[in-house]
Structures are given as C-alpha cells and as structure tokens.
C-alpha cells in the first residue's frame, strides 16, 4: 500500500516556498513593466492615466488569452512526450452490443 505524506510533514518549508517560485518567475517582467511605465511618465511623453490604462489593457489581454496558451502548451508537451490524454468516455461514445441469437427462437 502506498501512502501519501502531507507536504508540510515531509518538508516543513514546502508550504512557505510553494508560491515563491511563481513570484520569482514574474518579478523580472513586472520590474521591467514598472520601469518602462515610470520612465514614460518621468520623460513627459505619457500621462499617468495613460500608463495605468495600458497596464489594465495588458492584464485583460493576458487573462483573455491564458486559457488558449495553456491548452496549446499542454498539447505540445503531450505531443513531445508521446503521451495522449486519457479522457472519460462520453455517453454517446458507448454503444450497446447487439444481441444475436444463434440456433434458437427468442
């Protein structure tokens, strides 16, 4: 019998570091975006409201396209490993076997 260990029992720092990887992965692009926005305002080429509107537009666009990009990256990963996703059969895909009587009358 295989038992699962609770992550905090196996590694007491697992819960503390679980979200840290995502923050580190996004820190560079976030710092670049904040720096670009701040420099545009400081140079006087944009109003702060323009920069804020651009950030809102970018956030909306990323949230809108995230499901598609996630599906594409999963499909590419499955194709590269040769693993096909196993899905549960749908009710229409299961056919009843026909009853065939041999040698007798029913």
Image: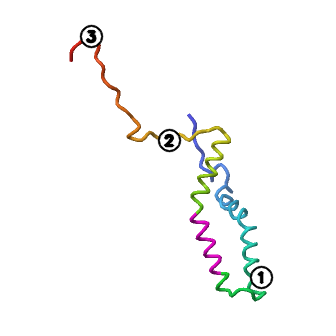
| Residue depicted at 58% across the width and 66% down the height | 63
**Viewer-closest of 6 and 17:** 17
**Viewer-closest of 6 and 59:** 59
Q: Measuring from the top left, give residue 25's x and y in whole percent.
A: 72, 62
| Mark 2 residue element | loop
In the visual, does 19 lie left or right of 87? right
Residue 30, label in figure:
none
Question: In the rendered image, which residue does mark 3 sit on?
Answer: 103
Q: Measuring from the top left, give residue 96's x and y in whole percent.
A: 34, 30
Question: In the rendered image, which residue does mark 2 sit on?
Answer: 87
Question: In the rendered image, which residue does mark 1 sit on?
Answer: 39
What residue span does the magenta drawing correspond to? Answer: 52-64
Distance between mark 3 and mark 2 Cα atoms? 40 Å
Q: Measuring from the top left, give residue 5's x and y in whole percent.
A: 60, 45
In the visual, does 93 lie left or right of 56? left
Q: In which quadrant of the rendered view does residue 104 lie? A: top left
Instruction: Report if residue 41 lies within the magenta region.
Output: no
């Amino acid at each position: 019998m295989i038992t699962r260990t609770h992550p905090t029992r196996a590694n007491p720092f697992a819960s503390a570091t679980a979200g840290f990887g995502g923050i580190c992965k996004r820190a560079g692009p976030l710092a670049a975006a904040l720096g670009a926005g701040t420099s545009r305002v400081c140079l006087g080429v944009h109003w702060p409201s323009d920069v804020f509107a651009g950030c809102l537009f970018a956030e909306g666009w990323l949230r809108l396209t995230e499901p598609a990009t996630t599906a594409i990256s999963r499909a590419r990963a499955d194709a590269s490993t040769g693993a096909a996703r196993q899905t549960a059969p749908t009710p229409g895909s299961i056919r009843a076997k026909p009853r065939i009587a041999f040698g007798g009358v029913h």
